[in-house]
Every structure is written in structure tokens, then in C-alpha cells.
Amino acid sequence: MNRVYNFSAGPSMLPVPVLERAQAELLDYHGSGQSVMEMSHRSKWFDDIIKNTEASIRRVLKVPDNYKIGFFQGGATQQFAMVPLNFMTTGKADYLVTGNFSKKAAEEAAKFGEARVVASSKDRNFTYIPDVKAIDYDADASYVHICQNNTIFGTRFAEVPEVEGLPLVADMSSMIFSEPVDVSKYGCIYFGVQKNVAPAGMAIAIIRDDMLGKSAKSIPAANIPTMMNYTTLLNKDSMYNTPPCWCIYMTGLVMDYLEHDIGGLDEMKKINEAKAKVLYDYLDSQDFYTNPVEHKYRSMMNVTFTSPNPDMDKKFCAAATEAGFVNLKGHRLVGGMRASIYNAMPPEGVDKLVAFMEQFRKENA
Ligand code: PMP
């Protein structure tokens, strides 16, 4: 077996013990004589899977009892529309634009009401997070939306914004389960699963009870399309229709791994901090590669860097691929390189990448 170190921003690496367990259970899941891919979502086996998956998310993330957890198709992008459709009760919401996905979320919300951009870091190409203490929120906003970690630009919020009693809604797609989160500070947390949680094909939303049962001012609750209505879907325990069964099963395996192999999110955070430190310390120790992000806001998951010029970036990516470090090419909006070092990237993957980078620097500086 010759597995590569995959630095993709998502879909991305899954922990090997999780893949091995999925493999071992593939043909005959727990004596059912079938795989999870084949079984009815109304079967007793799947009923256990979905309930156990939800219960382990609750334990791992310490989700309070007054929050519901839902499994939805349509990825995080569909959440950009579901959030305003379900929560924009006053017809207004405040958005912090700190990158491409928060910009898209704001644009989607503007289809349903007034999506006010209350802060943006566009002036310096999204290389920092605006001062969250200096933001003037609209007291009449239904919620405040942030993207907690900006996958493309490699930034993250250093602190959770204080939003003056308004519900805080956060896209956590590229940092969820990388460290503990105080769920009680949020009205809604959502994320696509294809980075730290499971294979692509699902989003998870964690929603405080009092946010449910409502709709955007511009649309009566009864007119929200069924598959976009959190309240309807959560009242049916994400089983209104056929759910993304395989993704839910794999999420459960990853939760087991986080809980029992890693020992929870405090431990996961230590491992992730150490990995990110190795890479950032190296970037700060030389001047061939550059990371443009203001230090305080550097992402623990997505590390961007450039070499002296775009031709060298190309050469770097080609040589890295050859050496077994794949998907290091940066997003087209930023150029250069990006190493996504999610939970499943082993520490030795980062150590070896740094050794490779230093070798490449010596040969090309
Ligand atoms: N939000 C963030 C922070 C992301 O990184 C991504 C995908 N890279 C998305 C939203 C969009 O997710 P999806 O492709 O699941 O719609």
C-alpha cells in the first residue's frame, strides 16, 4: 500500500483506522448480511447508526440538550440558503465577510432579505479578520453570520465575536472537531462534512431550539421548500426522506475515533496546534516561502504560502506531487500553495512536508 500525504482542502484525508473499520464492516455490517450502502434507512441497523452518530457528536462536541442536530444533503452551500430562509425573521441579518464562502453566504441571504455586510477584510485580500469588537451590529438583525475558518485564505477568528444578544450563526466547515467549541455561544453551527468528518455529500447543522419554527419575513413558514425547512427535517430526526446513510455511518466512525483513539477534542487540538506550529515556524524561519496572513489570525487547518514567483510555485507543486505530497496547489483566488492539515493528516506528514520544502528551497533559492 502506498498512501500519499493528501493536503487537499476537501474532500480530504480520513483517519486510516476509520477506513480500516469501514473496510472490515463493508460486506456484512454487524451480521446484517449487507453493507451500510445497501441497507434500508428504516432498518434496525440504520436506526442504531443514526442515533449513535448523533449521540457521539453530542458527546464529542459537548452539545447542550437545547440544541438539535440534523444531517442534510446539499453541502454547506445549501446551508447558505437554509440559514436565511429559516432564520431571517426580521427580514435583516448581519454578515461578516472574511473570505469567499462568507461572501457567497451573504449573497445567498440577500435573495431573502437585507444581508448587511457589517465588516469585511477584502481591503487586504482577506489576510486578516476585522476587529470584532469594533463592529456596529443592527439591533434588528435576525442573526449575525460568520465563517469561523476561511479555507481559501487560511485565516480564522481568534475569538468568538460578542454579538450583543443576537444569535450567532457560524459556518465551521473547515475547522469543526479540530478543537473544542463552546456551542452555547451560537444559535446555529453548520458545516460540510468533507474535511474533518466524513466523505463528501452531507452537511450537519446544530441549532438552538428557539431558532426553530420560524421563517424569513419574506416567506411564510409553510412555503419554505420542505427539504430546506430545518424545523420539518429536524422534527423527523433527519429522516423525512432517505438520508445520506453512508455519510452518517462514516461520521459515526470518525466520532468513535475522536472519542476513543484520540481522547476527545482537547487532545485533538494539542495535536493540531503542534502540526500547525511546525509548518508556521518553518515558514517564519526563512525567506523563500511567504505566508501573507496576519499572525494572530493564522488558520490551524489551512496554511497558505507562496514561493518567490508563480513559475516556482508550479515547479514546487509538481515536485511535491512526485514526492507523494499531493493537492498542495493553492486556490485560484490566492495562487501559490495551500497545505490543508486537517485532523487526519498525521504529524509525520507535516514533518516530511517541511523537510521536502527545505530541500526544494536549497535546490531553488
Ligand atoms: N464553507 C466553507 C468554509 C468551505 O470551506 C466550503 C467548501 N470548501 C464551503 C462552505 C462549501 O461547501 P460545500 O462544497 O459542501 O457546499
Image: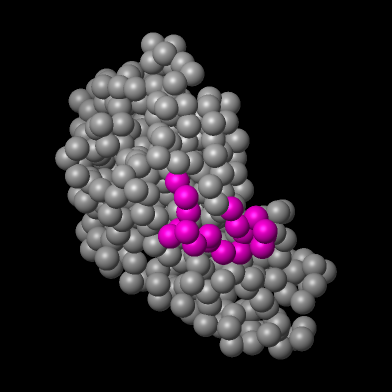
Q: Which quadrant of the view contains residue 204?
A: top left
Residue at figure coordinates x 24%, y 38% from the top left: 67
Quick check: 67 left or right of 171? Answer: left
Q: Which x, y percent locates residue 355? A: 58, 82
Range drawn in magenta: 120-137
Work out which quarter of the rendered image holds the C terminus and state it: bottom right
Residue at figure coordinates x 57%, y 64% from the top left: 128
Taking the view exactly as shown, the residue that stands out farthest to the top is: 222
Secondary structure mainly formed by the magenta segment: loop
Q: How is the image coloured?
A: one colour
Residue at figure coordinates x 46%, y 77% from the top left: 277
Question: Is 123 located above or below residue 356 in the figure?
Answer: above
Q: Nearer the viewer, residue 221 or 62?
A: 221
Question: Is 265 located above or below residue 240 in the figure?
Answer: below
Can residue 76 be seen? yes
Q: Which quadrant of the view contains residue 289?
A: bottom right
Q: Which x, y percent locates residue 292? A: 64, 71
Q: Nearer the viewer, residue 308 or 106?
A: 106
Q: Which x, y percent locates residue 347? A: 43, 73
Q: Which x, y percent locates residue 57? A: 26, 45
**Total numbered labels:** 0
